[in-house]
Image: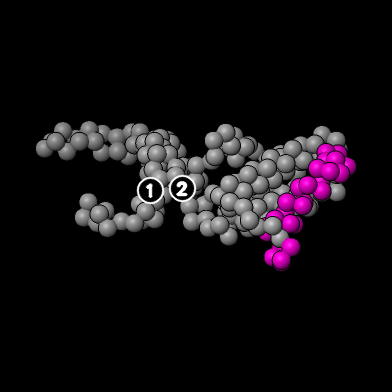
Amino acid sequence: EEHIARYTEDDCFDMLEFLYDSVSKPVQGNFHSYNDCGWHYTHFDKKEGQLDFRDSVSDFLQNYGSGWELLADGDIVAVADEGMGPLLDAKMPHYDPPNVEQRVASAIHKFRSRSSTDEDKRDAIRDLADILEFLRPKAKRYFLTRSDDAALFRIANEFAIRHHNDRQKGDYSITIWYNWIFYAYLSTIHAAVRAIKASE
């Protein structure tokens, strides 16, 4: 109460993340009635405490500004676009962790981070394009048609995502475009990995 009036938005979010990391739910203890002392707890459940804490701040975060979410790992990130939450939460099939799953998770974190800039979001999209490049030979064999393949990489290579030259087409709304291409690439990676695994 002494300092909260001077908190910035980042301070508030930092404090919520700190409280989430620190909280535990009391589950066992003794009641001390003398002088209204109250309960003295000896056993705690950290996971239950964190779940309760997430529930308690969920409505506030979703309705604050453009909308935020406290993840189970303790990070506050931007709320997913409407209808896209299941895609972000979907578990990537086990395929090639260092080249696919870990890179996808890193790109999602970079794109949704509360400190993410337009440049960070472009980097996240570029990372997804690189994952598609890695999957490309088998995806072309089992999943993508020639025109699908050409269109996907034309977006990355000609619309100011991977390259910086005078041939790039960059006259678009970054907010709308980046969200669209991020989710399009992410869903394509999910589909490609599933198609490759099914075919092999």
Residue lying furthest left: 35
Q: What residue did someone put label 2 on?
A: 76
Magenta-drawn stretch contains 33: no
Specify the label residue 24 is tagged with: none
- Against 170, residue 20 (above or below) is above
Question: Is disc 2 placed on a helix, strand or loop?
Answer: strand
Q: What residue did someone put label 1 on?
A: 16
The quarter of the displayed image where residue 139 is located: top right
The disc labelled 1 sits on which kind of residue? Leu
- Say whether residue 102 is visible: no
Q: Which residue does the image show at 52% across and 52% down from the upper left? A: 113
Q: Are marks 2 and 1 in contact (CB under 8 Å)?
A: yes
Q: Position of residue 99 (x, y in %)?
A: 73, 52
Image: magenta residue range: 141-167
The quarter of the displayed image where residue 148 is located: top right
The disc labelled 2 sits on which kind of residue? Ile
Q: Position of residue 105 (x, y in %)?
A: 62, 48
42 or 91: nearer the eye?
A: 91
